[in-house]
Image (tube, coloured by chain):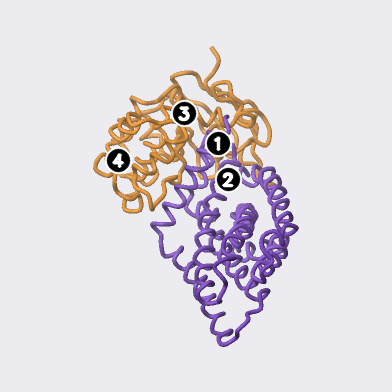
Chain colours: A purple, B orange
Amino acid sequence: MADEALLSYAMKLARKDLTIELRRVHEFMSILAFALTSVLISSFAWRGLLVLNPEVVSATLWIVIYFSSILALTTSFSREVDRGTIDGLRSLPCPAYTILIGKIIYCVVILFTVFMATILSAIIFLNIRLVFLPSLIVVFSLGVIDLAIIGSIVSAIVMYSEGKTLLLSFLFFPVSIPVLIPGIQAVGMIISGAGLSGVIPELRLLGSFLFAVVAVSILLFRYVFHE
Amino acid sequence: MPSVVELSNVAKHYGPIRALDGVTLSFDKGEAVVFLGPNGAGKSTLLKIVAAQITPTAGEAKVLGFDTAQQPEHVKRNVGFVGHRSFMYDELTVEENLWFYGGFFDATHEDLERVIEMTKLQRWRNVKVSHLSYGLRKRSDIARALLSDPKVLVLDELFSGLDQESAESLVKHLKGHRGQALLVSSHSLERVRQLCDRGVYIKAGRVEKEVDL
């Protein structure tokens, strides 16, 4: 099967999930509300401070993205299982990993939207300088893709278990550490004024982790999805 | 002439549970077969194996010469499958659902119109699936399965939850669109008698007897 066909199938799946998400707007809005109120509450704590601690600001932004990804991922596969549509996905004449790629694309779009809302509110409420925005977009884009891939495969692994929400939260954290540590460091350094060239080692880590999780997820998903 | 569906010594085990145990069957072109038996007999498992939804623990299942475990994509391209739960998404309309699934089978506008007309869903094509009755949902699922003009149609618990009128209407629609083979599971022989010409009784994962209807 041609790569373009596989990509087009993955895009169809992602479009279907995004359409459903837009029609069930309350779930996406609750993620967005969580992100915005988190930034706002953080801004109350730092009111009056002239210089914000870049590491703490960085950690705040990553906490928002991390928990938003848990909220988005909890329903990613489990909703398909709960409604019986997972068998519909199984009846599609495409390799299993196409389904995973579709779910990852959907999750990246959701998380990137949450990230943009978070960073724009952080510029307003946490005094992050606008000039840092392009560098932050680069770091968070890599981090969001990493989290979406890891989260999607973990969500698929736990989809049939009873305590899937709890399991997802527990399993997602340890495998996210290789994203969170370089991510938090890179964002902290960017906010300190290091620029993108100053965080090349962290970007390399995020990039190489991306290749590793893509390979592992594609290999694993076939077994998770079919049995 | 090779059989359209061939099962040789097919077994499916879920841990200690033997859902299917050494089933050997074959179905020729033009046959319409009903699988009968009590709950938990293994009918749905058998149909899922034919539709390449699950792989057998042992044995071999072939559809149109394609191995369901080794070449599932080829099998799925040729099989229209309706499970006992709906595959339709509540938030999407009937037409949106059909476009979504049809997109994987290169379905055209003509295909869409054909199945909507065949299943008499014209009035409900733009209605969200969450607003449909069980019978209409079932019909939209059958429309989805027919969209790819499948050579083999596999329908699990075809009549469950359907009223008399909907069931009769379904039989009427399906009579003319059986493809090369039609495999149905049911608890009741009465309703499928008009549709199928062979019955296979399954009990405890084994073929108990085969009858001409």
Q: In whole angstroms, how far apart are the C-alphas of marks 1 and 4?
A: 38 Å
Which is in the foreground here, disc 4 or disc 2?
Answer: 2
Q: How far, Cα to Cα, is label 2 from label 3?
A: 42 Å
For the question of whether residue A192 can be seen, the reply is yes
**Pointer 2 local density, CA inside 10 Å: few below 14, some 14–19, many at least 20:** many
Helix, strand or loop for disc 3: strand
Q: Quadrant of residue A175?
A: bottom right
Name the kind of residue labelled 1 in the image. Leu
Q: Position of residue B149 (x, y in %)?
A: 41, 27
Examine the image and state in which quarter residue B102 appears. top left
> Which label sits on residue B199?
3
What chain letter is assigned to the residue under label 3?
Answer: B
The amino acid type found where label 4 is placed reads Ser
On the image, the x and y values in percent for residue B8 come to 63, 25
Q: Helix or strand or loop: what does disc 2 sit on?
A: helix
| Labels 1 and 4 within one chain | no
Q: Residue at x 41, y 57 (%)?
A: A22
- Upstream in the sequence, badge 3 or badge 4? 4
Pointers 2 and 1 in contact (C-beta within 8 Å):
yes
Relative depth, front residue between A214 and A119: A119
Q: Which residue is mark 2?
A: A101
Disc number for residue B69: none
